[in-house]
Image (cartoon, helix red, strand yellow):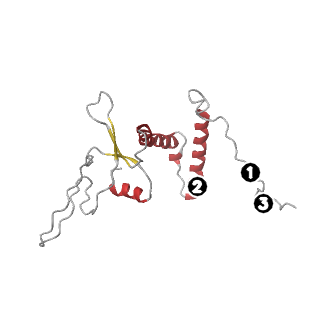
Amino acid sequence: GVDTAFRDGITQLGLAYVVGIQTSTSLWPPGAEPLPPKPWSGRGRPASLIRPANHDYNRPTPRPEEWLLVEWPKGEPEPTQYWLSTLSPTTTRRAMVDQAKLRWRIERDDQDLKQELGLGHYEGRGWRGFHHHATLCIATYGFLIAERGAFPPSDGFWPLSLKAPALPNDYQPRGAPDPA
């Protein structure tokens, strides 16, 4: 989230985001915006817009507004986490916090895959071998998560049995003889 070009790329893809930023990131407060360029006197280089908030000195238009999400735990002298978001203005605060915290769940899953299931222990040299190894590790992790969800306190959270989708009436398995 610190890299402005990365956030611009996500926006150009038409995706919304919630990304962590550093405390040193400067932002424009609501209702404030950068000063317009000074009128050109006819001598020297024409003036450009001043945007120290994102170091966008050559950007001709202001950036769209974004949400700033701040985590300030009780008892802490100052905030501990900051995020920028382009989620819809109708997004609830709880949903925005859930999206911001989703990163930690993903990092925890990655850590479990590498340390507990051996994803980080692959020593082969080929893509195909790594692909098979990763597939088995991820399938095992999915199975373990499903099993873990069957026990309290998660027992009501995860479905105990997954139902296979119904096959179409004209379905024919590959390699089966043509119907007569």
Residue sitting at 15 percent across and 63 percent down?
Answer: 38
Task: Residue 111 in the image: state x and y as whole percent.
Answer: 47, 41
Identify the element where label 2 is drawn.
helix
* Identity, as a three-letter code, of the amino acid under mark 3: Gly
Which image quadrant for residue 72?
A: top left
Looking at this view, is 88 or 122 the one in front?
A: 88
Looking at this view, is 109 or 132 the one in front?
A: 109
Q: Are marks 2 and 3 in contact (CB under 8 Å)?
A: no
Task: Residue 124 in the image: state x and y as whole percent.
Answer: 54, 54
Marker disc for residue 175: 3
Kindly report which numbered mark, 1 or 2, lies closer to the viewer in this rendering. 1
Task: Residue 20 in the image: state x and y as whole percent.
Answer: 36, 45
Specify which label sits upstream in the sequence, 2 or 3.
Answer: 2
In the image, taking residue 56 as reference, residue 11 lies left or right, namely right
Identify the element where label 3 is drawn.
loop
Q: Which residue is under mark 2?
A: 129
Question: Distance between the Cα atoms at labels 1 and 2?
Answer: 32 Å
Residue lying at the far right in this picture: please name it: 180
* Identity, as a three-letter code, of the amino acid under mark 1: Leu
Q: Quadrant of the C terminus?
A: bottom right
Specify which label sits upstream in the sequence, 3 or 1.
Answer: 1
Residue sitting at 59 percent across and 50 percent down?
Answer: 135
Residue sitting at 23 percent across and 56 percent down?
Answer: 51
Q: Which residue is under mark 1?
A: 167
Task: Residue 123 in the image: state x and y as whole percent.
Answer: 52, 51
Looking at this view, is 44 or 5 the one in front?
A: 44
Q: Are marks 1 and 2 in contact (CB under 8 Å)?
A: no
Identify the element where label 1 is drawn.
loop
